[in-house]
Image (tube, grey):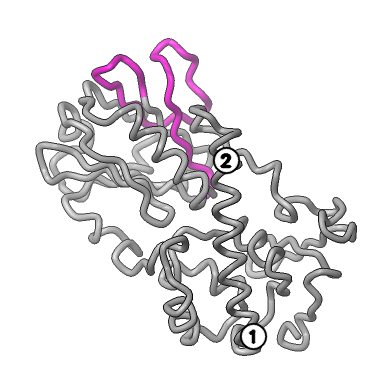
């Protein structure tokens, strides 16, 4: 799933490349109908065609295109396998290309989704989208005092807390693993077991991890926004490889239909004792 670092870089690239351009043509492949959500009930492709892109922003794990005349919004929620591709019209289409936006500048923005789990919403108010209005502050915008205050109301496992969009926005499964490795916290510890200094350390690790990852993604992705460079990750999807800090093989646990990677030496704990 693209998370804050990837989507932040994608939004940067798109702001450089598409602002002020008009959507000259919008094509939805037959199989792509499942990813399209027209909340205006005016026709997804026909309403978008002729609109001008006024702004592109990231909010949590969403990309929000502000269109004129409007207000009208195209909101992309890529979820697990959704990607945007910025390319020339004659470039061969990637498998499972579901929506193609041809821009007035001559290039195309394509939505690709191997599992068709993401959504492209056409709406007059992003707050009408599921989970959008309930999102918490951005993970890189929240101050430490607010972080401390907001985290108190959650009692579950700390990894699950980090990935809750109503706590902080932008963190998913992958970067939660990286943040907790940086903070040296066992992913399945209960939030209620964390000491004040551990919560402060978690906040610091969150900022360090996301800022560092964004810089690395920016350098490696360039303008190939369909890519998801994550080779630099310390533990996520690194099962069996040596921990970059201590050399212990990275462990994997599948719990609640989610893969968690961590280092048992750097992040000690037990699922059978509340994570302690």
- On whether residue 99 falls in the magenta region, the answer is yes
Report which quarter residue 245 is drawn in. Answer: bottom right
**Going 10% across and 37% down the picture, which residue do you hit?**
69
Decide if residue 156 is on the left or right side of residue 121: right
- On whether residue 100 falls in the magenta region, the answer is yes
Instruction: Read off the residue under disc 1.
Output: 194
Q: Is residue 258 visible from the viewing direction of this image?
A: no
Q: Secondary structure at mark 2?
A: helix
**Going 54% across and 69% down the picture, which residue do you hit?**
162
C-alpha gap between disc 1 and disc 2? 31 Å
| For marks 1 and 2 on the same chain, the one whose residue lies earlier in the sequence | 1
**Going 24% across and 55% down the picture, which residue do you hit?**
126
- Is residue 188 placed above or below 56 in the rendered structure? below
Give the number of callouts: 2
Q: Is residue 49 visible from the viewing direction of this image?
A: yes
Decide if residue 60 is on the left or right side of residue 221: left
Instruction: Read off the residue under disc 2.
Output: 217
Residue segment shown in magenta: 80-108
- Residue 269 rendering spot, x and y as whole percentages: 79, 79
Q: Residues within 10 Å of mark 1 (few under 14, many from 20)?
A: some
Q: Nearer the viewer, residue 107 or 9?
A: 9
């Amino acid at each position: 799933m693209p998370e804050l670092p990837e989507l932040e870089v994608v939004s940067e690239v798109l702001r450089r490349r598409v602002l002020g351009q008009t959507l000259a043509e919008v094509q939805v492949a037959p199989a792509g109908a499942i990813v399209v959500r027209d909340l205006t009930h005016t026709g997804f492709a026909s309403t978008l065609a002729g609109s001008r892109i006024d702004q592109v922003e990231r909010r949590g794990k969403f990309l929000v295109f502000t269109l004129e005349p409007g207000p009208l919004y195209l909101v992309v929620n890529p979820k697990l396998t959704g990607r945007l591709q910025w390319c020339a019209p004659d470039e061969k289409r990637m498998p499972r290309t579901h929506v193609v936006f041809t821009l007035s500048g001559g290039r195309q923005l394509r939505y690709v989704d191997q599992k068709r789990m993401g959504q492209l919403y056409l709406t007059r108010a992003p707050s009408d989208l599921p989970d959008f209005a309930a999102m918490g502050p951005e993970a890189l915008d929240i101050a430490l005092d607010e972080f401390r205050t907001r985290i108190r109301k959650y009692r579950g496992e700390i990894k699950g807390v980090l990935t809750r969009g109503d706590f902080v926005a932008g963190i998913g499964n992958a970067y939660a693993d990286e943040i907790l490795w940086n903070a040296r916290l066992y992913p399945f510890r209960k939030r209620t077991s964390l000491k004040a200094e551990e919560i402060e350390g978690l906040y610091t690790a969150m900022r360090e991890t996301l800022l560092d990852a964004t810089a690395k993604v920016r350098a490696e992705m360039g303008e190939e926004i369909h890519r998801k460079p994550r080779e630099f990750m310390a533990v996520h999807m690194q099962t069996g490889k040596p921990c970059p800090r201590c050399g212990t093989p990275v462990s994997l646990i599948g719990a609640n239909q989610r893969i968690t990677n961590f280092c048992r030496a750097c992040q000690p704990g037990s699922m059978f004792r509340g994570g302690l």
